[in-house]
Image (tube, rainbow, N blue to C red):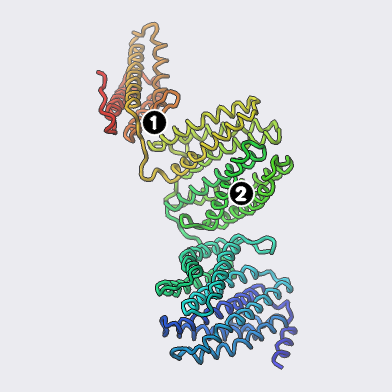
Amino acid sequence: RALVLIVTVVQMAGPTALTASELTDAIDMAGRQRMLTQRMAKEFFLVAKGYKPEQNKANLAASIALFDSSLQKLINGSAADGIPAAPSQNSLAQLLMERELWLPFKAALQENVDKYPIPAAPLGYVQSSNMPLLTKANDAVDALVEDARSLQVQTSGLQVNLAGKQRMLSQKMSKEVVMTSLGMDMPAILGALKGTFDMFAATHVTLLHGVKVVGLPPTRNVCVLRQMRVVSEVWENFKPLVLNVSLDGRVADVVLEQVAELSPTLLREMNAAVGLYVSQPSDCTIPLSRSVWLQVLDRVARSQHTMWAYGRMFLQVATEVETAGARTLLQTREAQVTDDLTDVREGSHQIPVAVTQPIADALLYAWARFEQVSADIRSNIDHPPVPMLTVKSIVIDFYVMVSDLRRGFELYLDAAAIAEPPPHVGAIALSCSLATSVEELVFEVFRGLEAEEGGAVSRVQASAVAFDQARSDLLHGTDVVNRTTDACLLREMQALDALWRPLARSSALFVAGNMSAAVMQNMSNHALGLYDQLQRVVTLYTRGPEGGCSLDATEREWEALLAQAGRLCTLCQRVYTERALAARGLALPWGSSRLTAALAGVSRSLEILTFGSNDVGLPSPPRQAVADQLLRLGDLWAAAARSPGAPGGRRSEAGGDAILEAAEALVHLYAQPASTAAPALPVAG
């Protein structure tokens, strides 16, 4: 009669009376019942094991009370909790069958938990009965999810259902570890433990990434992502404990203690995640320190570079340039992009979850497009050449993917710019442009080779110009970006220049119409050689040199640098001598040409000494003190050049004395090498 009465009430109320919030809350509560079946069994077995018996008895009593009250609310409804009565005859029937299994299970727990030792019969009953009760609780959840679907109520039901299952699986794993410690149902329980372990691990990834074919969306809400990151961190500690037990079948006391202590933590954090899946909050801002901002920006900047490298390797395979080696590297780059996109959106040990919802959305769009692009690439690379139409389709999707990731990076830069204190976002953006322009250049070369497009030449030229401009802006500075002053960075940029030049020459051959296999292979090799150096440069400009760097110079290089510094000093003296003579009307007939040559020589020497020169074989400043002095001298020279009638005229008016003193001080710095392998060099009188 009770069943008839409840069904009648539900039918009279009508399905339209139910809201998405009510159904989602009901699914959440029903999902929690699954977890409680396993937690109660775990707590009962922990008492039997003798592990903190009084604490676990109290925990068990609380679990029993919660399960019992929740079941009644799911059947009859609870206005106070926003839980509707069972929405359909099917869900009601499932809940009533769950109650039929629950009542004897509850009795077995309550009647035996205080016995010592707990008899074998009730242990066996709980062992054999907890899983049927779990199954029936799961059937009730499925029925409620189906109710939401049939009533066309939009809920987070599938996500909440899976997240709720994770709560259950956390306790099921723990229960199975305790059962193993008691020697119950061996070896079958080890197989069950391994299965539970695998399911939890797979479901964790599934919740984050989604499964399109079953209609499960990826986790989008940034607040939920942050909580799932907390779950990931707890899981990383819990995982090896469970895995080792499942493999060797032994549970040391210390392992049992660790599992018993971590299990509630994993459950608590997963339960918090379920609550967020239900509520979908919009405000969970967490301030980041400057060092964390720099770590994040470094990773997102480098991820764009890697993504372009991934696209370039695909086109290399598609055009059959060293296909075997390129295919292997393509797989490596795909794995790197996967890790990058996962970490910058979902967080990792080093970096936090995306800091704002728009950033998370942009990164999610990039991830969704990457899944499509990578699937298309994998299905086509085994039998090159890849059809031109297929390449064009993949390239279009690739451009969209790159655009989404770049949008996420730009949003990160905007967010970082208003942080306190703000990172140097201008230099970070430039270093990213520097890195991506190289891979973009080679990408466009191979794309042009495949598609035979005239536009490829202009795109390759644009990429080369972008590289040169970014490099110059980083070294010399702009209105919004400080110049490079760190000796370590100057040395790394010189190394980058040495690697860039061969690629620039090969790209010039392509622009001139040489598309031979040798040129293509050279471009591929040069780009590969540049990859690691570009990644390093991005990190250095983002986070700065950590732990110093090597600024070694040979004795011959020191001698050459000293000679160049001496020449610079002489040229400065010549400039002011010729200017002084001209000011007094005493200039010699050839003085004008000598002055012009000296002015150009000073500028050229400053450039060579400050940034190094691969043309003449001179390294960048071998000590920070030398770099600082060169930059000071350069500033004085630039200021003098901006003064009316200078450099030249009277020294005091144009800063000539200061320039000559700075040039002489530079010579003395070069005469005192830092390395003990290079003794102090004599300064010519």
SS of the residue under disc 2? helix
Q: Residue furthest front?
A: 187
Please report whichever mark, 1 or 2, sits nearer to the chain's N-terminal start: 2
The foreground one among 67 and 114 is 114
Rendering coords of residue 685 (x, y %):
24, 18
C-alpha span from label 1 to label 2: 38 Å
Amino acid beneath label 1: Ser
| Residue 652, quarter of picture | top left
List the residue tagged with mark 2.
404
Q: Nearer the viewer, residue 560 or 183?
A: 183
Direction from residue 132 to residue 261 in the image, left or right: left
- Is residue 408 visible from the viewing direction of this image? no
Q: Quadrant of residue 389?
A: top right
Spot occupied by residue 520 in the image (x, y as percentages of width and height): 61, 32
* Crowd around label 2: few <14 · some 14–19 · many ≥20 (10 Å): many
- Outermost residue on the bottom side: it is 1
Classify 68 as above or below 534: below
Q: Where does residue 228 sit, x and y in percent of width and height?
A: 53, 64
Q: Residue at x 52, y 81 (%)?
A: 41
Secondary structure category for the residue under label 1? loop
Picture residue at 68% right of the left edge, 69% below the top: 154
Camera-near label (1 vs 2) is 1
> Can residue 27 be seen in the rendering of this structure?
yes
Q: Report the residue that reaches farthest toward the top.
A: 589
Q: Which residue is mark 1?
A: 620
Residue type indicated by callout 2: Asp
The image quarter containing residue 201 is bottom right
Q: Nearer the viewer, residue 565 or 259?
A: 259
Q: Position of residue 626 (x, y in %)?
A: 33, 32
